[in-house]
């Protein structure tokens, strides 16, 4: 799951003890986030166009640094923006590695190199949390689950010359005690977005999801004071585009409303410096007040797990929040959110037990009808410790291979594995074919399906005309530079002509420069999808398992 980026890596538990002799000591610590393979979330093909190295920093590294007592020295290394200098790591006492399921192969490569050099290593994060034996003896210590109480406990053990080989926190972290992450230790100017976590946990029970395995079903939130302190730190670092990485921002609707009101007041005081993006569930459409608060806070887009238009599959996977006839169809609820001024992006899945060969066309049609340009489509995969994994393991429907030629460890019920893989690639190709993609974009932005002028920054500009003029002048410069970089970077002549033609249509429609910046960003994102699909068709299928 993408949302695992918010997991804190290192935690505490009970097992064997490894004592050494000597007085208490301080540690030189390096914490490493391995590079990702090219993916929907990574926006790798957009980065050269916008002059960045990576989309967003992983949340674990700066949080662990903030949890580290000041006596220790911490270095953060994100391989997505800088290479790992193994020679320099020789000076470190502790080297920690975190990572998600999609990073597991690279994690293993790094650990092998570190072990060969005789370095002391610890491993935590979402993947080792669900597959504890994956790295074997490559790591000296493993950590399972959350970190807030027990990363410091491990360091205290290490100072006392003894430590356990396995650490696991016994209770969920109290989010009201989480410190402000040390983003100052990262090269933040190399990221397109900053990251902010407000809550953990989700009340729903989707069968395939590991979020409730790691974070539980009771949403836990930071205080408004904590959130605003993090915004202050991001403003100090000149980071104004922020991805709120909560797996479900509205897991506790009443609690998040109070925090959103305080974010709105903060935005008002400082002239709306921040653009936000986040994740939530479709039941957002059932709360008009919450949609209004989200728009007023300037949360411009929300990623929603739609998963499938097949209601039988939704029921199968216990995605009950998407099947509520009394609240309207999924299309009706998506349109309600769009009309509130918030763009909907979504996750879709193929390969449920109730899916047959018709699902691929159904997915394409649904995205067209919903006017959703940006959709992360994936094949159903079973993550260890999830109910889906348990069910399929009992049925003998899991591929035991760590890396499957079919891109998933799930053996589907009503499709062959080749049909699932090929249908998945075909639907990705179809939805990101230029005409199909831009028809969805233009239907959303030109067809009146996205409510205009309802975001907080738009309302602020109406009340402060001079600030609006200043903002639009700046956006005109940004749009000009972005257009030049986009058209210069795209070498495929036909595709470049398509972008020029679409951008010209948007420009002559009389929209403001800020709209043009957003539209050109959509063109850049299409280029990323185009390259992603090219790789799939060449046999470089993103492999979840």
Image (spheres, rainbow, N blue to C red):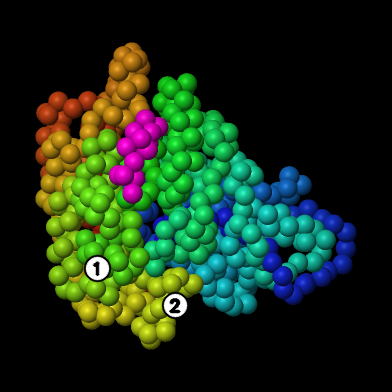
Residue at (52% x, 54% y) in the render: 218
Residue placed furthest toward the top: 466
Q: Is residue 299 visible?
A: no
Disc 2 element: helix
Residue 490 percent across, percent down from the top left? 22, 47
Above-or-below relation of 24 to 357: above
- Answer left or right for 237 relative to 2: right
Residue at (74% x, 55% y) in the render: 27
Residue 173 percent across, percent down from the top left? 61, 53
- Answer left or right for 456 relative to 113: left
Above-or-below relation of 236 to 102: above
- Answer left or right for 222 relative to 313: right
How far apart are the alpha carbons under marks 2 and 1? 20 Å
**Bounds of the magenta segment:** 283-298
Q: Is 45 or 100 nearer to us in this picture?
A: 100
Disc 1 element: helix
Does the magenta portion include 50?
no
Residue 166 percent across, percent down from the top left? 67, 70
Residue 497 percent across, percent down from the top left? 12, 44
Q: Residues within 10 Å of mark 2 (few under 14, many from 20)?
A: some
Q: Is 422 or 80 nearer to us in this picture?
A: 422
Residue at (54% x, 75% y) in the render: 134
Q: Which residue is mark 2?
A: 390
Above-or-below relation of 299 to 123: above
Quadrant of the snapshot with the N terminus: bottom left
Q: Which residue is mark 1?
A: 312
Q: Main secondary structure of the magenta part?
A: helix
């Amino acid at each position: 799951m993408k949302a695992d980026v918010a997991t804190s890596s290192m935690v505490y538990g009970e097992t064997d003890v490894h004592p050494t002799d000597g007085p208490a000591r301080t540690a030189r610590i390096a914490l490493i986030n391995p590079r990702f393979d090219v993916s929907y979330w990574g926006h790798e093909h957009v980065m050269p166009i916008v002059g960045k190295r990576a989309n967003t920093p992983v949340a674990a590294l700066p949080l662990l640094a903030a949890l580290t007592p000041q006596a220790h020295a911490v270095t953060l290394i994100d391989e997505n923006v800088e290479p790992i200098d193994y020679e320099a790591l020789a000076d470190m006492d502790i080297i920690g590695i975190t990572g998600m399921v999609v990073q597991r192969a690279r994690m293993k490569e790094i650990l092998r190199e570190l072990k060969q050099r005789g370095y002391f290593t610890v491993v935590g994060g979402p993947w080792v949390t669900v597959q504890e034996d994956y790295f074997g003896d490559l790591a000296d210590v493993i950590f399972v689950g959350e970190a807030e109480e027990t990363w410091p406990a491990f360091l205290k053990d290490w100072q006392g010359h003894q430590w356990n080989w396995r650490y696991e926190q016994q209770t969920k972290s109290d989010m009201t005690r989480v410190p402000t992450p040390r983003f100052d230790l990262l090269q933040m100017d190399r990221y397109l977005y900053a990251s902010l976590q407000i809550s953990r946990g989700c009340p729903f029970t989707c069968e395939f999801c590991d979020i409730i395995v790691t974070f539980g079903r009771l949403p836990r939130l930071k205080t408004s004071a904590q959130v605003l302190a993090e915004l202050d730190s991001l403003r100090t670092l000149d980071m104004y585009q922020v991805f709120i990485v909560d797996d479900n921002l509205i897991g506790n609707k009443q609690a998040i409303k109070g925090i959103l009101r305080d974010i709105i007041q903060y935005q008002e005081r400082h002239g709306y410096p921040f653009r936000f993006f986040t994740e939530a569930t479709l039941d957002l459409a059932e709360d008009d007040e919450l949609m209004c608060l989200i728009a007023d806070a300037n949360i411009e887009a929300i990623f929603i797990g739609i998963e499938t238009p097949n209601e039988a599959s939704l029921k199968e996977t216990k995605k009950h929040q998407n099947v509520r006839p009394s609240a309207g169809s999924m299309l009706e609820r998506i349109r309600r959110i769009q009309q509130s001024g918030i763009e909907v992006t979504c996750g879709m899945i193929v390969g449920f037990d109730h899916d047959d060969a018709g699902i691929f066309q159904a997915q394409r049609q649904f995205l067209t009808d919903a006017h959703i340009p940006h959709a992360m489509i994936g094949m159903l995969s079973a993550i260890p410790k999830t109910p889906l994994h348990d069910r399929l393991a009992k049925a003998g429907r899991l591929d035991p291979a760590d890396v499957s030629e079919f891109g998933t460890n799930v053996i589907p019920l009503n499709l062959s594995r080749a049909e699932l893989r090929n249908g998945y690639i075909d639907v990705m190709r179809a939805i990101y074919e230029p005409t199909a993609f831009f028809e969805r974009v233009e239907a959303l932005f030109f067809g009146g399906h996205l409510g205009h002028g309802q975001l907080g920054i738009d309302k602020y500009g109406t009340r402060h005309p001079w600030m609006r003029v200043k903002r639009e002048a700046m956006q005109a410069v940004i749009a000009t530079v972005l257009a030049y970089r986009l058209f210069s970077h795209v070498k495929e002549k036909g595709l470049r002509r398509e972008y020029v033609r679409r951008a010209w249509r948007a420009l002559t429609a009389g929209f403001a420069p800020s709209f043009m910046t957003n539209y050109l960003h959509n063109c850049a994102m299409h280029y990323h999808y185009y390259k992603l699909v090219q790789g799939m068709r060449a046999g470089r299928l993103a492999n979840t398992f």
